[in-house]
Amino acid sequence: MNDTIRLLGISGSLRKGSWNTSALRAAQELCPDGCELEICDISQLPLFDQDLEREPPQAIVEFKRKVREADAIVFATPEYNYSIPGVLKNAIDCASRPYGDSAWEGKPAAIMGVSGGNIATARAQYDLRKVMVFLDMHPINKPEVMIGGAAAKFDADGRLTDEPTRDFIRKMLEALVVWTRKLQG
């Protein structure tokens, strides 16, 4: 048995300078011992089409493989129109179908989100938690990582420089590792 916990990081933003993707890069640096995080690019996933779910495009097959191989998932989501971005929902749908063949089932997860606004991504994170109920995923409850006022917390190169925020991410990852090990038995 491999003692390393493998996390798969998924950003709900495709933007080149995405703060959410930058937060995942910070998480890579902050992983506790015995843990590694791979960031998965969802930009090449096609729009979900139920007509193709029995013979999915290779990008979906590969994405589902990565989700299945991960011990746990770390979502970093922006908030668009009070909810999760369409691109993130599309990725979730692609890996959950066909019915009965979801790659998400039983996966521990953590959620964080970055925004320029004050309430950060609270509504998007709540909506993502609702989706996880149906997917039978097991998100950690605390710490919640909602990074507001992002412009003051990331430098011009997208590096997360705010130490209290880095500490929240570190604690989230530690909690996710403990939770994952507990669920693995």
Image (spheres, rainbow, N blue to C red):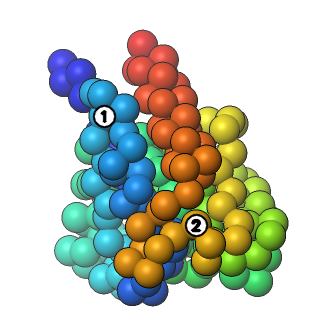
Q: Is residue 162 above or below residue 50?
A: above
Does 8 appear above or below 137?
Answer: below
* Residue type, label 2: Lys
Question: Which of the 4 image quarters holds residue 94?
Answer: bottom left
Foreground of the two, 160 or 31: 160
Which residue is identified by label 1?
35
Q: Is residue 80 something one can see in this rendering? A: yes
Q: Is residue 71 left or right of residue 12?
A: left
- Is 28 drawn above or below residue 1 in the view shown? below
Image quarter (top left, top right, bottom left or bottom right) of the C terminus: top left
Q: Looking at the image, which is closer to me, 56 or 150? A: 150
Left or right? Give the position of 44 relative to 74.
left
- The amino acid type of the residue labelled 1 equals Cys
Which label's residue is closer to the chain start, 2 or 1? 1
Q: Residue at x 37, y 32 (%)?
A: 32
Residue sitting nearer the eye, 119 or 82: 119
Residue 153: image tag: 2
Residue 80 pos. (x, y %)? 69, 81
Alpha carbon distance from label 2 to label 1: 25 Å
* Other residues around mark 1 within 10 Å, as few (<14) / some (14–19) / many (≥20): some
Q: How many marks?
A: 2
Give the residue at x 32% y 60%: 39
Query: Which of labels 2 and 1 is toward the front?
Result: 2
